[in-house]
Image (cartoon, coloured by chain):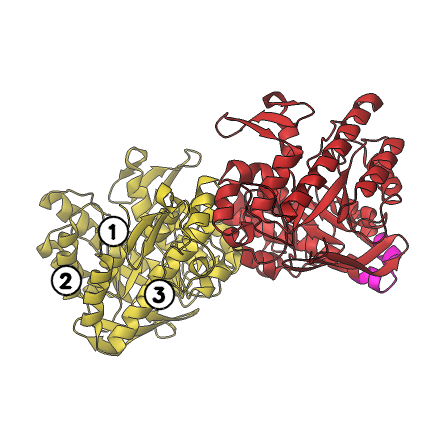
Chain colours: A red, B yellow
Amino acid sequence: MSESPYSFRVTHADGRARRGVMTTAHGTVETPAFMPVGTQGAVKAITHRDLEGIGAAIILGNTYHLYLRPGDERIARLGGLHRFIGWPRPILTDSGGYQVFSLAARRRIDEQGAHFHSHLDGSTHLLTPETAANIQANLGSDIAMVFDECAAHPCDVRTANEAMQRTLRWAARARAQMWAIRANAVAGVTVSNPGQAQFGIVQGSVYPELREESATASVAIGFEAYAIGGLSVGEPTEVMYDIVSRTTRFLPEARPRYLMGTGTPQDLVESVARGIDLFDCVLPTRNARTGQLFTSEGRINIKNARYAEDPRPPDPDCACYTCRTFSRAYLRHLFMAGEISAASLNTLHNLYFYLDTMGRIRDAIAFGRFESFRLAFHQSLSRPAVDS
Amino acid sequence: MSESPYSFRVTHADGRARRGVMTTAHGTVETPAFMPVGTQGAVKAITHRDLEGIGAAIILGNTYHLYLRPGDERIARLGGLHRFIGWPRPILTDSGGYQVFSLAARRRIDEQGAHFHSHLDGSTHLLTPETAANIQANLGSDIAMVFDECAAHPCDVRTANEAMQRTLRWAARARAQMWAIRANAVAGVTVSNPGQAQFGIVQGSVYPELREESATASVAIGFEAYAIGGLSVGEPTEVMYDIVSRTTRFLPEARPRYLMGTGTPQDLVESVARGIDLFDCVLPTRNARTGQLFTSEGRINIKNARYAEDPRPPDPDCACYTCRTFSRAYLRHLFMAGEISAASLNTLHNLYFYLDTMGRIRDAIAFGRFESFRLAFHQSLSRPAVDS
């Protein structure tokens, strides 16, 4: 760890909200930050150039998908994930755990790890805490995640405890594997990025006592930082906010906290208010492709007939290329006509809205006015909805 | 016509190849020029911003598609096609004729025009020389095309003659309609672009004597410029080149000549050598979406397994964003993974290659070395193919 370029520094605090700078082997990330999801080595429907243009500082790659196609070993031979995909900025990779658990009938979990069938060709595979670390070492992401077991929702306390305890045992194995990788002591693994950090994951479903135990024990193992997993899986929003609020209290102030797979713009603001620094979510990109746009006045469905002759931009307050250039009428036409540009322009806007929101959050924290920002943000979003 | 901003000036000639400047109501176009096809008001899989970035000076819109969806009257209410789609540069619209004739069983042609069923909802419609002119007036393109009858290939001389004679009668009606539109004497039509020019179309299939008659009679009617239609419909390449070469001799030197729906990079060079100034074709955009890339050494199919670990750019001689940033291995991965970015990045490259080729052609003509460019171009493309 001594030679790792990874570091994090809180530069401003405002209540429990923090602003900071995370440094990785491929550059710095101002936090709180949102990570667009680039599942297969590309954020869907947007070029890297446009992503950089709207200020994306870090993206997320999915280990499960990249392991299956084109393969982590192939990516290692091509110089690692950054070089393979042509993205020079930081990348975080998940561990593959969440995707594997989502396979339902196609997977079986035991103490060793998760046995599963590929969704591409049905071939059988085994992901373990060790192989997930190896794959991410081949990929060479800047931040690797430990292989965890994400309990479904709802889930009784006994099942949640078992998944959480197993996640802790797996975390210890993953950390040991990471030390071995850093010592170049793992045969067959290419260390594509010697500066790779590793984050632990707190589990425990909706049970505060399990979250506390998971957080405390994860910190005892010792990772560069800590994530909160197993939320945004169907529980009520207020429950999620409560668990986030309670869990962050047991995570070190000096390390970033990453809330995995969340969420709506409101979720981002509320989670920052509870001490979260990092986010990822498919919502802005996935919804863009179905015609749903996030705006400063709420969501609009661009396919709605009411926009057929609406000359206004999607969000009159937005400075993105889409809003500066195109009308709702044109964007609706592109969507109805099945044009690829509909996905591209909607994605560009939604990601801009998310990244711009994070920038406003960071500014508000720096100026000690996060609470007033938070109120104004919710008031703006709760204006009478333009449509459902 | 006196107030029309439309003009054309030949600035350089080199053999039969010409370089010139075409001025329209929305700006100038350096010729020879290639027009990317924006069928439904968008060039597929590329944003206007990227199109402008690679130097597209003019795009083509399809009257048939825009008439059916979102409708030319709606577009007129929204300020015309330029404003509706957010493209400030010149636009040429076809007449809808080619699309209607492609409908085969769904259309019937008589002296009045073409009766057809919409491919979207089966509704019945009638396109005539007059309505095609009216629709294009509503759209407000910078260049409108006359409604013509494009004979199929192969086609006997009698059938070809009938279609050509009908096209001439329709051309006279279209020109009369255009004068009425310019005089604001057509009820229900919004003149979205008072500076709209109108091009005639030469037909006559593969029969030189029909082409001569069609060209001469079209010039007698008098249009701002003339196009050659009914080629690139299945005839041998050498036949096409021969018809182009013979037809341009009967078209005025002082007006641009537009070869419709053509073609390969070689076709562009060979047609410029025979006096053509304008082109449009779906080849670069459509083939991009199926993984075929045009390069300075010929075409490559990016899905070919041989590229799975190829770190080279698609075309090492190309300066486009795709070639400057991404490897064949990554582009193959994106294509195999079904990522939208595959279509975007391939389209960006193919259009760049086409537009860059046109720029090289213009430079070669200006420096009086078009013949040596033409030879070198064919030699480069005929190197041992990278793949089929």
Q: Nearer the viewer, mark 2 or mark 1?
A: 1
Residue type at mark 3? Asp
Compared to B349, does A300 lie above or below?
above
**Viewer-side residue, A364 vs A336:** A364
Left or right: A130 as drawn, with respect to B166: right
Point out which mark residue B356 bears: 3
Is the residue at mark 3 from the same chain as the one at mark 1? yes
**Is any atom of residue A333 visible in this view?**
no
**Viewer-side residue, A291 vs B298:** B298
Q: Earlier in the sequence, mark 3 or mark 1?
A: 3
Q: CA distance from mark 2 to mark 1?
A: 29 Å
Point out which mark residue B52 bears: none
Is the residue at mark 2 from the same chain as the one at mark 3? yes
The chain containing the residue under callout 1 comes to: B
Residue type at mark 2? Ser
Identify the magenta region. Answer: A363-375
| Residue at the disc numbered 2 | B245
**Residue B39 painted magenta:** no
The chain containing the residue under callout 3 comes to: B
Q: Residue at x 80, y 31 (%)?
A: A205
The chain containing the residue under callout 2 comes to: B
Q: Position of residue B386 (x, y in %)?
A: 28, 50
SS at circle 1: loop
**Is any atom of residue A324 visible in this view?**
yes
Q: Earlier in the sequence, mark 2 or mark 1?
A: 2
